[in-house]
Amino acid sequence: MMYGCAEPGSVFPDWGPQPLEVEIGPGRGGFALDYAALHPSRRLLVIESRKADCELIRSRAARRGLANLEVFQGDAKLLLPRFFLDRSLAGAHIQFPDPWWKTRHHKRRMVDVELARLLRRLLKPGGVIDFRTDVPAYFREALQTWLEAGFRELPEAAPDVLSTRERRYAITGQPVFRARFENPATDIVTLPGSRTGRDWRDIRRK
């Protein structure tokens, strides 16, 4: 099922009664497919910018009979406020977002102050962000960004589903940085000053 891109606050899709979760940037869908299969009572929507990956995930989900997984192509920061009412999401998954290493591309980095403020609004109280990356500086900056937005970091826990990349890293020994954050029932805060959450630096891995 496909939906038009309505203006924020106008007409929203009726997603049904299942707990609603979203994955931003699923790539080829390894995590999304396994997660939807493991949690059939939840509805998982994935937003991916690459058309070929969207078509691949849709075909793999159809073969596995995953009626609780839906795929949409587009820019997540534009689609999220047009798809979901405030406090309607039970969870959000952001795994291994593109680091966009070149300085001129830093503005494209997914996790920033804008996204943190948006997810504070869209997630229910108690809703959880699942964040994973293999870039240490991205992890440190994202951690600060989530916490400054008012999210609470949850205790470490082993993930119930690993992405394709994580399974590969388990063999090669490449470290993965994971954290989960809970959305509290408090007001959304205004994040300080000119900080964007995108202006970090790190050594690019070969």
Image (cartoon, grey):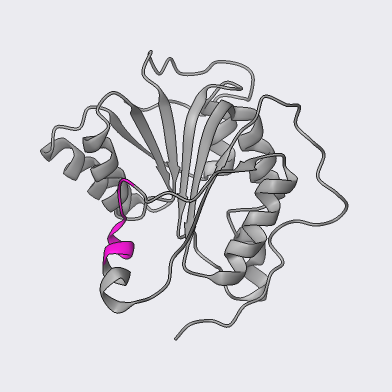
Quarter-of-image position of residue 15: top left
In the rendered structure, the answer to whether residue 184 lies left or right of residue 35 reads: right
State the residue lying farthest toward the right: 193
The one of 89 and 61 positioned closer to us in this rendering: 89
For the N terminus, the image quarter is: top left
In percent of width and height, residue 92 lies at 48, 39
Counting from the top left corner in percent of width and height, residue 44 is at: 36, 33
- Residue 173 drawn above or below residue 130: below
Provide residue 162's location: percent of width, then percent of height. Answer: 31, 54
Compared across the picture, whether 86 is left or right of 177 comes to: right
Q: Which span of residues is magenta-colored? A: 160-167
Query: Is 67 above or below relative to 78?
Result: above
Residue 29 in sight from this viewpoint: no
Looking at the picture, does residue 74 appear above or below residue 44?
below
For image coordinates 64% across by 44% down, the residue present is 115
Front residue of this view, candidates 59 and 30: 30
